[in-house]
Amino acid sequence: MADKLEQVYINFQKELGAIKDLKSLQDFEVKYLGRKGELTKILRGISELSAEEKKLIGEKANNLKNEMAGIIAAKKSEFQAEKYSGLAQSEKIDVTVPYSRRVGHIHPISKIRIELEQLFRSMGFMVLDGPQLESDWYNFEALNIPEHHPARDMQDTFYLADNAEWVLRTHTSPVQVRAMQKYGAPLRAIVPGRAFRNEATDASHEHTFYQIEGLMIDKDISIANLVAVMKELLSGIFQRDIEVRLRPGYFPFVEPGFELDIKCLICAGKGCSVCKHNGWVELLPCGLVHPNVLKYGGIDPKKWTGFAFGLGLDRLVMMRYGIDDIRYFHSGDLRFLEQF
């Protein structure tokens, strides 16, 4: 039996050299040290030996088993070290390679919108939102612009091809009526959001643009209240006195209506493509809310009055940062956006 143990060890050593991976080593371990392995087969015949032989063969078999197990364990550690070393090499980081982390930027329109929201909240205004896909009724009818009214020609509208009763809103003004219907009077609210018009683009016009609609309804509201809020708005956003002018303007949803212009900050009033070479930028249509609009909103115009304005947010941002072309805002050009 001692000769058989010696032969098992010789075979073990010969086959060990051919083991090249962990899977083969596991099979090799089962072959020699498993419950049905080569060493176990020999030890099953130990019961036929004398007491003295059992002691000698048992001790030798136990030593052999421990030695073989130690060799297999060492080989297993070697394979595992090679495996993790290979992973480390493949995942190794070269610390000498230049590293730069690109940080995102708040879009300039979003930046100014946030500032305006904070400014108006400080004056007691709510910040509201509304649908960009709007019904013809809210976008026109409820704002005192009935069907076939010539004022509709002022707004080149995107209609749905299969349903002309729905449009991409041409202004944020529809939320005026929605707010009056929901909250009643008194009411102070602004509505920042995106609007759409089907028109040719140039340095100061885009088919997609942003507005902030403002609405204040209370008792005895006058033009003086409107002018005071507008001055607070402009001084808050520009942090300086801005030269403005108020001139009559026609908008179906206000009466009387005005155009609030600011002296062009791009050219200091000398004339450029942004101000159409006249030195002034049309920034803020405004006026007292038309009685018909109050009625559509469910408010009695005999008891309540109010003012409304629609601020062109894109143009305000252009004035704030000296941007000479409105088309930059939606160009997706990182060279432009990374400046803010």
Image: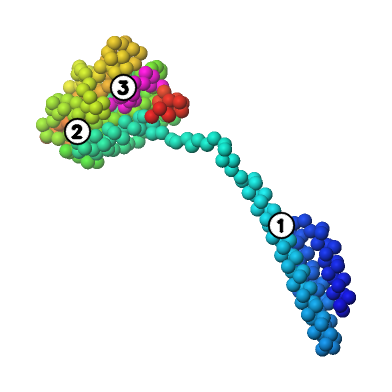
User: Residue 117 is drawn in which quadrant?
Assistant: top left
Residues shaded magenta: 309-327
Residue appearing at x 87%, y 75% in the figure: 4
Q: Which residue is mark 2?
A: 216
Q: Residues under labels 1 and 2: Cα distance?
A: 77 Å
Residue 183 pos. (x, y %): 22, 41
Q: Secondary structure at mark 3?
A: helix
Nearer mark to the viewer, of 1 and 3? 1
Residue 48 pos. (x, y %): 85, 86
Determine if residue 85 is in view: yes
Q: Which residue is mark 3?
A: 319
For label 3, the crowd category at 10 Å Cα-Cα, with few meaning under 14, some 14 to 19 and many 20 or more, is many
Residue 135 versus residue 112: which sits nearer the camera?
112
Q: Which residue is mark 1?
A: 79
Residue 283 pos. (x, y %): 27, 21
- Sequence-wise first label, 1 or 2: 1
As for residue 313 lying within the magenta part, the answer is yes
Q: Secondary structure at mark 2?
A: strand
- The answer to whether residue 221 is left or right of residue 259 is left
Residue 49 versus residue 71: which sits nearer the camera?
71
Nearer mark to the viewer, of 3 and 2? 3
- The answer to whether residue 289 is left or right of residue 1 is left
Q: Residues under labels 3 and 2: Cα distance?
A: 26 Å
Q: Amino acid at mark 1?
A: Phe
- Looking at this view, name the residue that lies furthest to the bottom: 51
